[in-house]
Structure formats: structure tokens, C-alpha cells
Image (cartoon, rainbow, N blue to C red):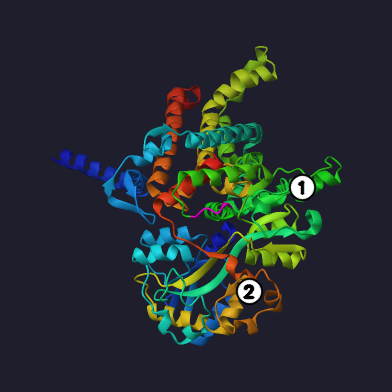
Amino acid sequence: MPMGWFRRSKTHRQMALIGPAVLFLAVLMLIPIVLMGYVSFLERGEFGGVRWSDHTVDAYVAFLFERDFDGSLQLNTDYLQIFLRSFWLSIGTTVLTLLVGFPTAFYMALQPPRYRNLLIFLVTIPFWTNLLVRNYAWILLLRNGGLIDSALAWLGLTDAPISVLYTPFAVAIGLSYSYLPFMVLPIYASLEKLDFRLVEAAFDLGADRRRALARVIIPLAAPGIAAGCILVFIPSLGAYVTPELLGGGKSLMIGSLIQNQFGAARNWPFGAALAFALLGIVLLAIVIYLLRFRRSPGEMT
Amino acid sequence: MRHRGLLAAVMAAALVVGAGSAAAKELFLYNWSNYFPPELLKKFEADTGITVTLDVYDSNETMLAKLQAGAAGYDIVVPSDYIIPSMIQEGLLEQIDTSKMANFKNIAAPHNAPPYDEARGYTAPYMWGTTGFTYDSARVPGGKLEESWKEFFEPREELKGQIAALNDEVEVYNAAARYLGVDVCTESGDDGQKVLALLEKQKPYLAMYQSDGTIDRMIAGEVIMHHQWNGASHRTKEKLPTAVYVYPKEGTAFWADNFAVPKGAPNIENAKVFINWMLDPKNIAEASNFTGYMNAVKGSEAYLDAALKDDPAVNMPAAYAERLRPAKSCGTAAREMRDKVWTRLKK
């Protein structure tokens, strides 16, 4: 009897401890997603919004097909092209942040422990300012006649305006800047735990610097690199503010496409369906990550 | 007016957070960002003893979506013409009988009986303006361009890459349709194709589609021609005197923003006091001086800054009146076609 009571009270205690987290996930994550999924299967309302009682899969059909004037369905690759463009841009951003982020994290990990916390602190400083304000700052930096342009001209390095702002490259720069900390911190977390005796051993066994990096350090940092890549890739894919401000608006990105559906097009179900297609792609990326890195050496520490 | 800058909207929203104290006489104003002089709010508070809390948005659709999602607590919203019939039909607006207000007699025709609310039962006029384009006369061949959308949609080779369009599906599509003589609410696929063909031909000549920062872009000389709202054009001219605003002869979009009271507003009477107060020539003139847009109240000219009164971009010469085209609320099929054209243009 006392044993049973104890076991039950332990269960209760566990439930009380887990409860807030479960509630948080259910209220702030699950319900909005379920609602979004539900909206994507509804008929659009005449003036925006949805008709809550009419169900249809039109929104998903419209992603790949369009009705021709005789009513027959035709393959329509417009939206796929927009998704593909965002996809490439996100890959470009991920590569850029990795190229800058890995050496940064490596440098941080090599510092004496008392400096490391200061460096982490410095990496997070950009987050103190609103994303929008930081993107406007990039406009001032990148525009023709802006800081970078004038500086290059003054140094005599360029004789024509750089014309970088309002190009996809400007968007990649803006996104890389915004998400760089998400790349640096997980890689740093992996490298910090790295046992540098392993690197010394590699040198003792005749490896040169490049070989030690490629065969010892990078494999051990792989989980951090993968986590960083996912943390950069996913938000880049759905980014809205940066492409809107730094891009020239000549080609749509997923974020702007979805915004258009809730705005000028007043087609909420299609907007919700697009968001769900995006969610599907992101889930796929995470599943691949989990399958690939479930049993990686770094996680055994 | 459709898009007033994300930055300003967010900053202003950040400023008002936490400002909603519990005064008995209060009014919650939900307006476009950077679209109401703060001094005028203070004057209203001093005149009436009603405390105003301001919240801001950046597009009609944002405001509509928020009301449709059940946002309560706003006493006044400022919808544009084309969205008002939808809001009335959806039952989102409170009937306020503007036509019975003391200052209704001040409203100039045709603003006293607009097509979207002919009896003025739900709305009162705030600012109105036009969407044409601005060019820098110092940098175009011959120093002068035709007053036609042709200069914008089929530009001269010299201006290639020096032109910017608004990043606005409705404005771009409607201007193109008017240039081609096509109904802006057309549901015919052939018409849609024609508009798309024109826009695709124009695209290589454009430097960008951007609704933010049109004034700075013109002043900095980044582009020579900009698809622009007349108020923004006026502000461009303050720094760039050679800027010229064009009312294209094929049809110039004409918009009007209006005060309206959302259904279930907590302070309806205060909202009516506010609206009547704003129809006073002196008060509304102060708003015009701040926004750079024209109001619809007779006698306000006397209180306008000279710069506004003397600028044809703001104080439209009467001869151009026939070029104005009021906004139309299009049906679902027409909207779908417009969105298809826009998506295909930018795929």
C-alpha cells in the first residue's frame, strides 16, 4: 500500500514537472500548426479569410497544377521554381555562414577558457538590436554611394558604383549576417569538447595541418556543423524581411509568396498550403539529419 | 496609400506597447504608420480631454486580417476606398452616420458621396492622393517626358536600368491595365496575358520593384524615374527640385483613406467626437502639412503650408481631374488572375 502510494505520487510529481513543457508545446506549437493545416483544406472567403464549413483540396492542387481555360488541369511549375530559388539561396547562405563561422568557432575554442565566455557574449551582441534595423543598416552599407561603395571608390579600387544592393547576392549577405551566430555557436559547442590530445596524436603520427583538420577535427565537429547548417538553412528558407528589403523584388521568395496570399491575393488556404509545403521540406531536412548523425562519435561524450 | 514602410511601423508599434493605461476617456486609433502628426494628437487631447493610444499598420490587408481574426479594442481604423465595401458587407464596421455630423458640411465634393460609401454612413474622408510616377527632369533626354504610362512601361533606352516600380501587385497591375485600355477587374485570360506581356517586356528596364524608401532613392539619384505616390513625390521634390510628378493621361490611380469605426469598438462616442473634430479645416490642414497629402475639407487650403499649396503633385490642377480613376473592388476571379500575372512575372 505505501509502495503503491509512493509510486503514484512519483508519477504525479513527474507529470507536474513535465506538464508545463507539454502545455507550452501544445498551446504554442501544436494548436497553431493544426489550425494552419485545417485552414489549408478550406474554401477561401470572398473578402479574405476562409469559409469554415467548406472543405477542399484545391489549395494543394493549385501548388502544382493550374486550370486551363477549358477547365483541364495543367502542370504549373511557377511555384516550384520559386521554392527552388529560395532553396538555392538558402544553400548559398549556409555555405557562406559555414565558411565564416567554422574558423570563428575554431578560434574561439582555442582561446583560454576565461576568454571564451567573453567571445560568446560578443557573438550574441547583434541580437540586441531588432532584425529590421540591422537590415536597414545593410541598405546604408551596400547602396551605391553608401559606406562600402564610397570607401572602395576613395581607395581607387572601383571606378563604377558597386551595384550590389537589390540583387540576390545582397540577400545572401544579409541572411548570412543575420544567421551567423546560429552557425558559430553549435560548432563552438562541438569544438569546445574536442580533446586536443587527439590532434596532437594526429601530428605525432605524421599528419600535417590540413590532414589533421580533415581527418580529426572536422569529423569530431560534424554534429555541430550539421546542427549549425540546419539552424541557418531553415530560417533562410522562409525568410521574409531580408529578401524584401535587400532584394530587388524582381523574383519572389517563399516568404514573400506566402505573404502575398494573405495580403493582396486574399487566398488564405493557398497561403496555408504553401506554408505546409515548406514545413514538409524542413521536416525532411531534419529527418535526414537525424538518420545521418544519430550515432556520430561526437554525441558519445 | 498602401505601404508606408515596415521600419516605421515596427518602431511606432514598439513605442506604444504598454501605453494603454486605464483613463476613463480614451480612444484607440489604429492607423497607417507615420500618417498622423503627434502634435495633432496632443491638441485633440487638450481640446477634448480624450486620451488617444496609437497603434499602426502597413497595409489595408494587415488591418483587415487583424479585424477578421477578431482583434477587438480599436475605436478607429483608416481603411482605403477599395476595401471598404468588403468591410461593410462583412459586418466589420459600425454605422456612424457621418452625414449627420456637425462638420459634414465641410467635406468637398466628390468626397461627400464616394462610390464605396455613397451615403457616408460608415466612413469619413482623411487623406486622398494619386499614384503616378516621378522623374528627374535634369536627367532625361530633352528634360521633359510625355504625360503617359508609355514612358514608364515602354521606356526610352537611355533610362534602362534607371527605373523603379512599386513592389505592389495592385498598383503595378492596374497601371499596366489602364495603359493597355483593359478593365482592371478583367476576368478574361487574354487580357491577363496582355498585361503580363507588357510587364515582362518592362522588367529588364527596371532596376527593382521596391515600395520602401522611394524618396531617398530618387534623391540619391539611384534611379531617374520612380513609380510613386504623389505625397512621396512632393517630399522628393523638397530635396530634388528637378523632380516632376506625372498624372498619366491613360488613367491615374486615385485612392482615398477614410476614418471608420470597427464593429464593437469600446468607445464609439469618442470616435465620433474625433471624426467630427478632424473634419475641421484647421485640424485636417495640420494633418496634410504632416503627411504631404491632400485632404477633402473645404477651407483647409488657408492653413496649408505654401510648399504644399504650390506643388501640383499635391494640389492637383483642375485639368487633371478627368484622369483620376477611383479604386475598384474586384471579384475573386479577377483577383486570382492578377495574382497569377504577378507570380508569373516574378517566378
| Pointer 2 chain | B
Which is more toward the observer, A5 or B34?
A: B34
Image position, residue B79 (x, y; %): 47, 66
In the rendered image, which quarter is residue A103 located in?
top right
Image position, residue A168 (x, y; %): 63, 39
Residue pointed to by mark 2: B318
Q: Under tag 1, what secondary structure? A: helix
Which is more toward the observer, A12 or B125?
A: B125
Q: Under tag 2, what secondary structure? A: helix
Comparing marks 2 and 1, which lies closer to the viewer?
2
- Which residue extends farthest left? A1
Which numbered circle lies on residue B127? none
Image position, residue B55 (x, y; %): 49, 67
What is the spatial separation of the Cα atoms under label 2 and label 1, in whole angstroms? 32 Å
Which is more toward the observer, A273 or A222?
A: A273
Let me know if residue B35 appears in the view: no
Q: Are marks 2 and 1 in contact (CB under 8 Å)?
A: no
Image position, residue A83 (x, y; %): 50, 36
In the rendered image, which quarter is residue A211 located in?
top right
* Relative to A65, residue A51 above or below: below
Magenta stretch bounds? B180-184
Which is more toward the observer, B271 or B88?
A: B88
Residue at position x 57%, y 57% from top?
Answer: B6
Residue pointed to by mark 1: B158
Q: Amino acid at mark 1?
A: Glu
The reply to whether label 2 and label 1 mark residues of one chain is yes
